[in-house]
Amino acid sequence: MVRLFKLHKFSGLSAGVVLFILGFTGFFLDHKNWSFLYTVGFESVPASVFQHEKRLIEAYWVNADDESDIVVGSRRGVFQKSDGVFVKVLERECLALKGDGEHLYAATDDGLYRRENGQWKPYALGGHFINALAVSDNELLLSSDKKTLFLLDKQRAKVLLETGVSIPYKELVHDISLSRFVRDLHYGRGLFEGVSSLLINDYGALFLLLLSLSGYLVYLFIKLKKYPQCSRSLIRLHANIFAIIALVPLSILLITGIFLDHPKGLANFMRSVKIPHAFLPPVYSSLKEDVWSVDLYQNRYRIGNRYGVYESDDLVKWSMTNKGFAYRMKRIDEKLYISGMGAPNRILHNGKYEVLLNTPHMFKDINLQKGEEQFFSSMSKVALPQSKDTSLYAILLALHDGTFFSSWWVWVNDIAAALLFVLGVTGTIRYLKKKRLL
């Protein structure tokens, strides 16, 4: 028992600070739609943090008739190029920009906006977080919170249909790669439908904060031989059945986190291992809240989710037409460009899907400039809005992946994750022995 205590104490003192950082940052990063993560900014941060700002750019639109007319949609707002400088023209999170030749539409965290005579005005669905948008001659198709589809009459901004997504079970029986499963689990969308998976992650993250903080305080109070009553209360808070339960989501997070820390070295292995659908959690047999992209063309509707592209002619009956995570979809005339996440980029033209070779992985937008396809991704070298500060989200992300400190800090995170496993085992054994259950 004494050896277990020493091992537990050594592991906690060694990894407690890193685990606190991982729990704190992970909790907020799981909630990407919280607007204050992008409105709160800091100026005095390491240069390495600014590289994460580019990941907040969600859309890059270039007017095909006037290539000096450039609009950028970001989690930090909508920016328009004016006299060679980007100016913020809309204080809303923007996840998509789509034009129809006459107007430009922005999918934001407060509904759909439209640019009219150079001014951005609310257009429809105020209060809805629009995550995907498609534009046709007469209609608009939108996804709200990845779960509700809206079909709008474009001229009147009137909702023609509001519906959820119900895909037949037979269209969902697909295996997935270990790579996809690991990411879904770590990002809080890999177990159950709705917010359940996210709440399980939150439970683990918050308990990690509590355990780290209470563990240090107990050690300090005992070392100083002060506040015995407070120490006993903290010990009860530190060692209880709820902490034992938290080890389940924490184990998932630490294992998947180690995998994600080394994407290059483990990529081939994770892609090659396939998990049969029969062994997948319930969410993979539903995907009611997994609409990442949308398209409409000639009375055919399409949605993209983690399995692939699904089509419908009535927004009710869906069937898969192309496999592979459809992260983004954008139509240019008769061609539909599909950005893959952990899957190849594709193009749909003349009724056939083809792989897009030599294109950036997970591209976020595409434009025709001088007749050539220009793909935009977080790696693209194009003119972007510049800011004197960096968002709270970028700082949290840099702290979480270790780049805030150094490129090698990822190994510190790995060691902390391994020590968390030791803490879980030793803490559980000590708790059970104390309760005389072992």
Image (tube, rainbow, N blue to C red):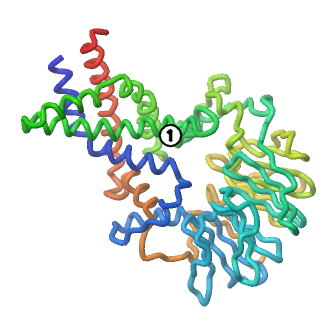
In the image, is 161 to the left or to the right of 341?
right
Q: Which residue is mark 1?
A: 186
When asked about the image quadrant of residue 167, the answer is: top right
- Residue 371 to residue 76: above or below: below
Q: Point out the image quarter for the C terminus.
A: top left
Q: Point out the image quarter for the N terminus.
A: top left
- Judge the density around disc 1: few (<14), some (14-19), many (≥20) Cα neighbours within 10 Å: many
From the top left corner, tell me how far across and down residue 93 is, in percent. Answer: 59, 64
The disc labelled 1 sits on which kind of residue? Answer: His
291 or 221, which is in the foreground? Answer: 221
From the top left corner, tell me how far across and down residue 83 is, in percent. Answer: 60, 90
Q: Residue at x 89, y 67 (%)?
A: 137
In the image, is 56 to the left or to the right of 41?
right
From the top left corner, tell me how far across and down residue 412 is, in percent. Answer: 30, 45
Give the residue at the far bottom of this rendering. Answer: 83
- Counting labels gives 1
- Residue 75 to residue 167: above or below: below
184 or 175, which is in the foreground? Answer: 184
Q: Residue at x 19, y 31 (%)?
A: 9
Secondary element at tag 1? helix
When asked about the image quadrant of residue 223, the answer is: top left
Q: Residue at x 52, y 66 (%)?
A: 54
237 or 73, which is in the foreground? Answer: 237
Would residue 128 be seen by someone viewing this image from the given angle?
yes
Would residue 356 be seen by someone viewing this image from the given angle?
no
When asked about the image quadrant of residue 44, the answer is: bottom left
From the top left corner, tell me how far across and down residue 366 is, in percent. Answer: 70, 66
